[in-house]
Image: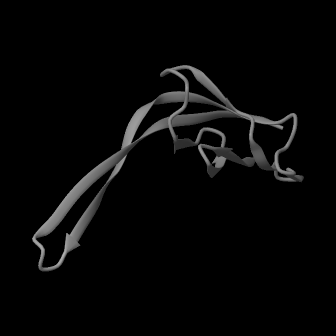
């Protein structure tokens, strides 16, 4: 059984006991979170597609903590002007373990 959920403007394909990194949520470490924006649900026999979301279905997970993503480096350069600028950024994510898919 798997589902496709939407959170933080992105879509994720999730299964039970899977660990995913999502945009920051309004919750604390160790607490449970519920994703109600379920777009697609497949239980092995039946496929349900939402329009745009499936009512009466949700995905439950447990917030494991914060992690940082890969470093992204941006470099700006103007030739013959002596202008150089290097900037780095690491995005912060919440790591969530999927505990249950309710359909």
Give the residue furthest to the bottom.
Answer: 80
Q: Residue at x 19, y 61 (%)?
A: 85
* 63 relative to 83 in the view: left or right: right
Which part of the image, by quadrant, shows the C terminus? top right
2 to the left or right of 75: right
Left or right? Give the position of 38 relative to 10. Answer: right
Q: Position of residue 91 (x, y in %)?
A: 38, 45
Residue for point 85% across, 43% down? 54
Tell me which residue sits at (66%, 40%) in the image: 16
State whether residue 101 appears in this view: no
> Does 13 sit left or right of 21 as displayed?
right
Q: Position of residue 62 (x, y in %)?
A: 57, 27
Residue sitting at the far front: 81
- Image coordinates for residue 10, horizontal then vertical, percent: 61, 51
Residue 68 image offset from top left, x and y in percent:
36, 42
Q: How is the image coloured?
A: one colour
Count the labels in the image. Answer: 0
Q: Name the residue: 65% across, 47% down.
A: 14
From what the image shows, is residue 69 above or below residue 30?
below
Query: Relative to residue 19, is residue 34 depicted above or below?
Result: above
78, 101: nearer the viewer = 78
| Relative to 11, residue 82 above or below | below
Q: Is residue 24 visible?
A: yes
Question: Which of the 4 quarters of the picture holds residue 26?
Answer: top right
């Amino acid at each position: 059984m798997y589902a496709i959920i939407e959170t933080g403007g992105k879509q994720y394909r999730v299964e039970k006991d899977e660990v995913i990194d999502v945009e920051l949520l309004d919750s604390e470490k160790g607490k449970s979170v519920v994703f109600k924006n379920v777009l697609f649900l497949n239980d092995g026999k039946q496929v349900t597609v939402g329009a745009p979301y499936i009512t009466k279905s949700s995905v439950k997970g447990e917030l494991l903590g914060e992690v940082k993503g890969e470093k992204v480096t941006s470099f700006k350069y103007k030739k013959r002007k002596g202008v150089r600028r290097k900037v780095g950024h690491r995005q912060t994510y919440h790591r969530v373990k999927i505990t249950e898919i309710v359909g």
